[in-house]
């Protein structure tokens, strides 16, 4: 079974352009897409914090998707981490400060999109190497993903038997 990381490269809003320019990246947002086609994400101007919702891309060309095989145990770890962090708010201080200093600044119980995904994947044993990263932008996350092959959302197979 697979999970996929959706990496947003569309024009979006002003904050998307600022993130892309500040991080020198084509990506400005990331979402973790689970086998049931729901995504776990957090948006900077949302009051819902870390939340889960159906993933329906408005325009597939505005996204890159990297899929990662997971075991049932790894998926359970990710879903448990979601339950522990559900509703926690956006980490403006950590996201901005980590761009200015050569080390990672983290506000407990606050996240930004790619940081939450990186921590979830690390807890599940899917990626490592987070501690030597000063920031965890969507671009940095994309480079940590095993395989790294970009696929179209319409080509993603979410059959639990695979």
Image (spheres, rainbow, N blue to C red):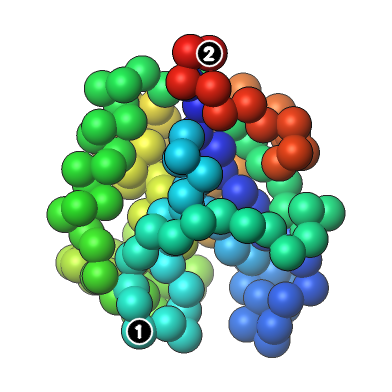
Distance from disc 2 to disc 1, alpha carbons, whole Å, reads 36 Å
Q: CB atoms at circles 2 and 1 under 8 Å apart?
A: no
Q: Nearer the viewer, residue 97 or 82?
A: 82
- Mark 2 or 1 closer to N-term? 1
Indicate left or right for 32 with 138 as reference: left
What residue is rendered at 18% in x and 67% in y?
A: 108
Label 1 sits on a secondary structure element that is loop
What residue is rendered at 72% in x and 76% in y?
A: 12
**Residue 162, disc:** 2
Q: Is residue 76 above or below residue 6?
A: above
Q: Nearer the viewer, residue 11 or 139?
A: 11
Q: Is residue 114 visible?
A: no
Q: Position of residue 98 (x, y in %)?
A: 42, 67
Label 2 sits on a secondary structure element that is loop
Q: Which-is-in-front pick, marks 2 and 1?
A: 2
Q: Quadrant of residue 159?
A: top right
Q: Is residue 133 above or below residue 73?
A: below
* Residue under label 1: 47
Q: Is residue 47 visible?
A: yes
Q: Quadrant of residue 148?
A: top right
Q: Position of residue 49 (x, y in %)?
A: 33, 73
Q: Residues within 10 Å of mark 2 (few under 14, many from 20)?
A: few
Total label count?
2
Q: Nearer the viewer, residue 3 or 29?
A: 3
Going by the picture, which residue comes out furthest to the top?
161
Q: Is residue 118 above or below residue 93?
A: above
């Amino acid at each position: 079974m697979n999970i996929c990381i959706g990496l947003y490269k569309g024009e979006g809003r002003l904050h998307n352009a600022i993130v892309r320019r500040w991080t020198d990246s084509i990506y400005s947002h990331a979402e973790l897409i689970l086998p049931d086609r729901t995504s776990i994400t957090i948006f900077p101007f949302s009051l819902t914090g870390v939340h889960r919702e159906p993933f329906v891309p408005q325009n597939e060309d505005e996204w890159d998707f990297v899929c990662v095989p997971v075991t049932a145990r790894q998926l359970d770890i990710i879903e448990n981490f979601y339950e522990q962090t559900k509703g926690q708010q956006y980490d403006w201080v950590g996201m901005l400060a980590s761009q200015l200093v050569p080390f990672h600044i983290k506000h407990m119980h606050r996240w930004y999109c790619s940081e939450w995904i990186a921590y979830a994947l690390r807890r599940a044993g899917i990626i490592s190497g987070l501690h030597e990263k000063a920031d965890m932008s969507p671009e940095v996350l994309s480079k940590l993903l095993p395989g790294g092959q970009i696929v179209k959302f319409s080509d993603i197979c979410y059959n639990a038997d695979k």
